[in-house]
Image (cartoon, rainbow, N blue to C red):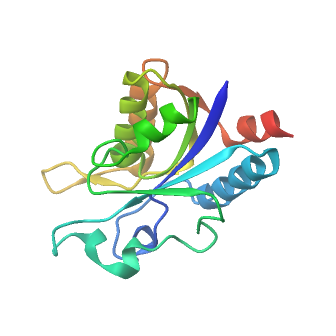
């Protein structure tokens, strides 16, 4: 089984101090450890980067688009730049994965209820075996539309529950690391 790691949208914009509360404070450290394990094992790492097309978009700003420190792609690692939530729409990611015979995707990144979830759902619908590393994903509090915020942990748990078994096998970062040691 050929496998790749999808690192979704780990960009500087998600460090902005004006963003609402988030969960998984150690998610970036876990993501970096998983990336190191994939590199050591010779497995492929694919970086997904969001770039807004509307000048009012938060991810239109060049500083926000840049990868966070420690998440810059290494030589030979592919970057697919998307303009919508799914890493498959408007990119040649699907063709790339098919050409390389990749049939299993381990997915982590920012943010779970948006780009990570959308990419996981589409990957599963395209027939990939998907592994979601739930504690290596970031979720922010979301407005309920009535002036209150849903906690980042509740939003995260809901999204994990919606993806589990239907679209992905849900694992912890420790489970992924144990697989590669």
Q: What residue is at 51 percent from the left and 34 percent from the top?
A: 99
Which one is in front, 100 or 40? 100
Which one is in front, 165 or 83? 83
Q: What residue is at 44 percent from the left and 20 percent from the top?
A: 127
Q: Is residue 121 left or right of residue 52?
A: right
Question: Does 43 appear above or below 125?
Answer: below
- Residue 157 lies in what quarter of the image? top left
The quarter in which the C terminus is drawn is: top right
Taking the image as drawn, is residue 114 in sight?
A: yes
The quarter in which the N terminus is drawn is: top right
Q: Position of residue 122 (x, y in %)?
A: 36, 31
Q: Position of residue 17 (x, y in %)?
A: 40, 77
Q: Is residue 24 left or right of residue 89?
A: right
Taking the image as drawn, is residue 154 in sight?
A: no
Q: What residue is at 42 percent from the left and 31 percent from the top?
A: 123
- Residue 53 lies in what quarter of the image? bottom left
Question: Does 154 appear above or below 30?
Answer: above
Question: Does 115 appear above or below 72?
Answer: above
Q: Is residue 140 left or right of residue 45?
A: left
Q: Position of residue 45 (x, y in %)?
A: 62, 50
Query: Which residue occupies the extreme front position in the image?
Result: 99
Number of numbered discs present?
0
Query: Which residue occupies the extreme left position in the image?
Result: 146
């Amino acid at each position: 089984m050929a496998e790749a790691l999808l690192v979704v949208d780990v960009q500087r914009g998600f460090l902005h101090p004006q963003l609402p509360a988030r969960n998984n404070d150690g998610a970036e450290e876990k993501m970096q450890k998983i990336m190191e394990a994939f590199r050591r094992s010779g497995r492929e790492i694919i970086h997904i980067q969001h770039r807004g097309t509307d000048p009012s978009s938060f991810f239109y700003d060049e500083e926000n688009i840049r990868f966070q420190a420690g998440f810059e792609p290494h030589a030979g690692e592919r970057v697919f730049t998307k303009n919508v939530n799914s890493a498959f729409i408007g990119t040649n990611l699907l063709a790339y994965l098919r050409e390389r015979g990749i049939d299993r995707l381990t997915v982590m990144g920012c943010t779970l209820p948006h780009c990570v979830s959308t990419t996981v759902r589409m990957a599963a619908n395209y027939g990939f075996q998907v592994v979601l590393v739930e504690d290596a994903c970031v979720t922010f509090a979301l407005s309920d539309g009535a002036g209150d915020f849903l906690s980042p942990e509740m939003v995260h748990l809901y999204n994990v529950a919606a993806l589990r078994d239907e679209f992905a096998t849900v694992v912890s970062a420790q489970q992924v690391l144990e697989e590669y040691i």
